[in-house]
Structure formats: structure tokens, C-alpha cells
Image (spheres, helix red, strand yellow):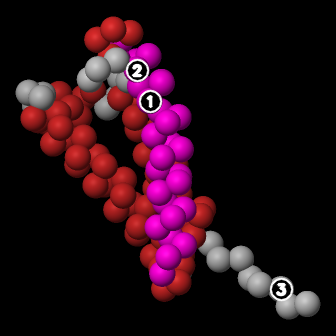
Amino acid sequence: MIVAPAIGASAAVMIEFPLLLLAMAWRARTIVRRPPELSGTGNLVVMGLTGSIVLMFAELLLGLALGINARQWYDDLFHMPGIAGLAGQGPLALFPLLFGRRKPIRAG
């Protein structure tokens, strides 16, 4: 909202994209390391999918608050910069699974 008017929406998303991926990876890593009962594959997949759904819903709500109707928001997902945003949803959904796997401890 601040940078996009100056450099364009696509350029702003390309600047934001790696920063958001780093922030999401860091947060996913800290969340899944806390309770050991969340380490099951099913739990981690649900956690990742829930995170993606919540993020998409938050983006929709922000769009509605800024005066974009739901149909336009949906259509924008399939054009730049929306495509870059969708590309970030894949890693977000996978981060809990990637960071939540417990490595076996070797004796010795």
C-alpha cells in the first residue's frame, strides 16, 4: 500500500515476497517446535492448510475493506501480482510439514 504506488504493484510484490517467505518460515519453525503432539504429519498438514486459508481470507477481507469486491479479488489472483501471491501459498502450506518433522535422536 505504501510502495506500490511509487514502483508498481508487481514490483512491490516481488520485493515483499521473499521477506514474507522468510517471516512465514521463521514463524512456522517456532510454532511447530513447541508442543510435541503437533509433530504428526496429519497435524502439520492441517496446520499448513489452515494457515493458507486464514491468510487468503485475511487478504479477501483487506480487499473488501479497500473497496474491491470479492469477484474482482478472485479474478486478480490469476494475474500478476496475484500469481506471485498464490505462489507464496504453496510454501506457506508446506512450512509446518518441513519444519515440524522430528529427527530421531541417535544414542551413542
Identify the residue position indicated by label 2 in the image. 12
Which one is in front, 54 or 18? 18
Secondary structure of residue under mark 2: helix
Q: Which residues are magenta?
A: 8-35
**Residue in view at x 49 percent, y 60 percent:** 28
Label 2 close to label 3 by CB (< 8 Å): no
Which one is in front, 82 or 4? 4
Identify the residue position indicated by label 3 in the image. 106
Going by the numbered disc 3, the residue's amino acid type is: Arg
What x and y, as percent, mark residue 107? Answer: 85, 91
Instruction: Look at the picture and state if 94 lies above or below 62.
Output: below
Quarter of the image that includes the N terminus: top left
What x and y, as percent, mark residue 37? Answer: 48, 85
Going by the numbered disc 1, the residue's amino acid type is: Glu
Can I make out residue 90 in this image? no
The question of residue 17 being in magenta is answered with yes
Identify the residue position indicated by label 1 in the image. 16
The question of residue 99 being in magenta is answered with no
Q: Is residue 77 left or right of residue 62?
A: right
Going by the numbered disc 2, the residue's amino acid type is: Ala
**Residue in view at x 60 percent, y 62 percent:** 98
Distance from disc 1 to disc 2, alpha carbons, whole Å, reads 6 Å
Q: Residues within 10 Å of mark 1 (few under 14, many from 20)?
A: few
Secondary structure of residue under mark 3: loop
Label 1 close to label 2 by CB (< 8 Å): yes
Quarter of the image that includes the C terminus: bottom right
Instruction: Look at the picture and state if 50 lies above or below 104.
Output: above
Instruction: Look at the picture and state if 32 lies above or below 86.
Output: below
Q: Quadrant of residue 67?
A: top left
Q: Is residue 17 left or right of residue 55?
A: right
